[in-house]
């Protein structure tokens, strides 16, 4: 299929720049997977829509403050304020295997041409721009600004990130260069159930959930399981090919716990619906299902990585329901949703969402497909 087959027109003013005033107050478009019919609802209707016994699977990955500002060693410009001349912007996308106490990371860097292998980058806190909190050497250079960085050992690398980093909001969410994050972003660009730090972007379908919604789901008899997939480079890279069969995704690490494996096996054996919260959860579950089919073994607790790309024509082996936000035109996420519910039905639902002025993308409204 052509990537352009997944285009739709979206007015800029429908791209949500802020989360809803109250978490959980979003609108929700319910799409019937069998008929293509859709209904306007509220996210707070979710517990009443799901059935007792449904298994709701969440991705509990937590977003790292992975957007950093650096100075190249030897330059005298002030660094780690948002936009000085000569500054280097670094987005950490995925941790690599560490060597002898070092922290190696894949990253996106700009301006990329100035940052080449053997270069040293200095990262400071905004309040103390002259003192480097972290130092990194560029190990390798790839395409489209991709770099591998090796950070020198520090007592607590993740504490240092919390001190100097910013949450990597998507580029369509506009913030002043002087304030890459607002205090609200620090809270609202994380799910309330996030636990495992490691993502370069939020699993945004989960941003709608609140403790009250979880209580209502429990009272309804909905079972909940948590898996972890750390969102990496692929979420930031645009599709650069013309045909979907030529798309290749970066691998992202995941962990499936014993509790989650048991819950998934139980739901599968008993014929209960498995409802994935978000495309990251969907990709992980479908990858796990394919590995289980390949080995002819029940799903078991393990860690691994997945680069699974789901597009129209694939068979879904585990997921029978999907809660997801509205995605960018011609994106791999829109292709996944179209694979699940049918391209024509999804694009009709998106056209309705545009006409009814739903809010789009990470801070926007959501869809429930059953």
Image: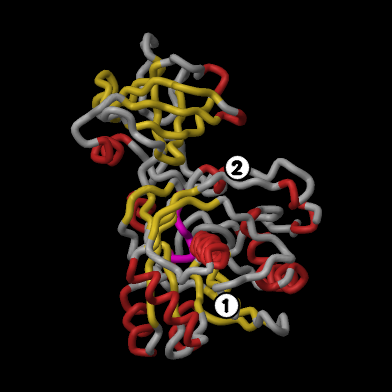
Q: In the rendered image, is residue 180 in sight?
A: yes
- Residue 123 rendering spot, x and y as whole percentages: 33, 25
Q: Nearer the viewer, mark 1 or mark 2?
A: 1
Pick the front one: 3 or 172: 3
Question: What residue is pinned by disc 1?
Answer: 320
Q: Left or right of 29: which side holds 1?
A: right
Q: Left or right of 334: which side holds 62?
A: left
Q: In the rendered image, is residue 364 in sight?
A: no
Indicate whether residue 61 is drawn in magenta.
no
Q: Tell me where the magenta segment starts and ends, as one range.
A: 201-206
Q: Secondary structure at mark 1?
A: loop
Q: Kindly report the distance in space between the C-alpha atoms of the residues bearing marks 1 and 2.
A: 28 Å
Q: Secondary structure at mark 2?
A: loop
Identity of the residue drawn at 74% across and 52% down: 244
Q: Are marks 1 and 2 in contact (CB under 8 Å)?
A: no
- Residue 308 rendering spot, x and y as whole percentages: 59, 55
Question: What residue is pinned by disc 2?
Answer: 237
Pick the front one: 276 or 255: 255
Identity of the residue drawn at 59% across and 61% down: 360
Identity of the residue drawn at 37% across and 74% down: 262
Answer above or below: position of 180 versus 270.
above
């Amino acid at each position: 299929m052509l990537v352009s087959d997944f285009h739709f027109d979206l007015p800029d003013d429908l791209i949500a720049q802020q989360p809803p005033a109250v978490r959980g107050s979003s609108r929700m478009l319910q799409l019937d997977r069998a008929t293509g019919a859709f209904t306007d609802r509220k996210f707070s209707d979710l517990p009443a829509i799901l059935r007792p016994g449904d298994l709701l699977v969440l991705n509990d990955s937590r977003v790292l403050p992975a957007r950093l500002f650096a100075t190249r060693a030897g330059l005298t410009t002030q660094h780690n304020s948002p936009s000085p001349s000569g500054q280097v912007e670094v987005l950490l996308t995925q941790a690599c295997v560490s060597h002898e106490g070092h922290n190696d990371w894949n990253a996106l860097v700009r301006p990329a041409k100035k940052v080449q292998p053997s270069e040293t980058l200095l990262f400071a806190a905004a309040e103390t721009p002259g003192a480097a909190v972290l130092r990194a050497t560029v190990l390798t250079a790839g395409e489209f600004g991709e770099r591998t960085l090796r950070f020198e050992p520090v007592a607590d690398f993740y504490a240092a990130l919390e001190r100097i980093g910013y949450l990597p909001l998507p580029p369509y969410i506009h913030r002043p260069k002087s304030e890459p994050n607002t205090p609200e972003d620090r809270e609202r660009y994380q799910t309330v159930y996030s636990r495992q730090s490691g993502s370069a972007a939020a699993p945004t379908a989960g941003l709608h959930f609140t403790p009250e919604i979880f209580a209502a789901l429990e009272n309804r008899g909905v079972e909940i399981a948590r898996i972890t997939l750390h969102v990496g480079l692929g979420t930031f890279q645009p599709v650069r090919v013309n045909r979907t069969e030529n798309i290749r995704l970066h691998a992202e690490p995941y962990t499936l716990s014993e509790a989650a494996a048991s819950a998934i096996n139980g739901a599968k054996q008993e014929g209960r619906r498995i409802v994935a919260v978000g495309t990251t959860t969907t990709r992980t579950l479908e990858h796990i299902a394919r590995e289980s089919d390949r080995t002819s073994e029940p799903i078991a607790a393990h860690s691994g990585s997945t680069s699974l790309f789901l597009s129209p024509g694939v068979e879904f082996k585990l997921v029978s329901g999907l809660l997801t936000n509205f995605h960018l035109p011609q994106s791999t996420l829109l292709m996944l949703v179209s694979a699940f519910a049918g391209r024509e039905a999804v694009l009709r639902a998106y056209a309705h969402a545009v006409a009814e002025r739903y809010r789009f993308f990470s801070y926007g409204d959501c869809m429930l497909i059953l």
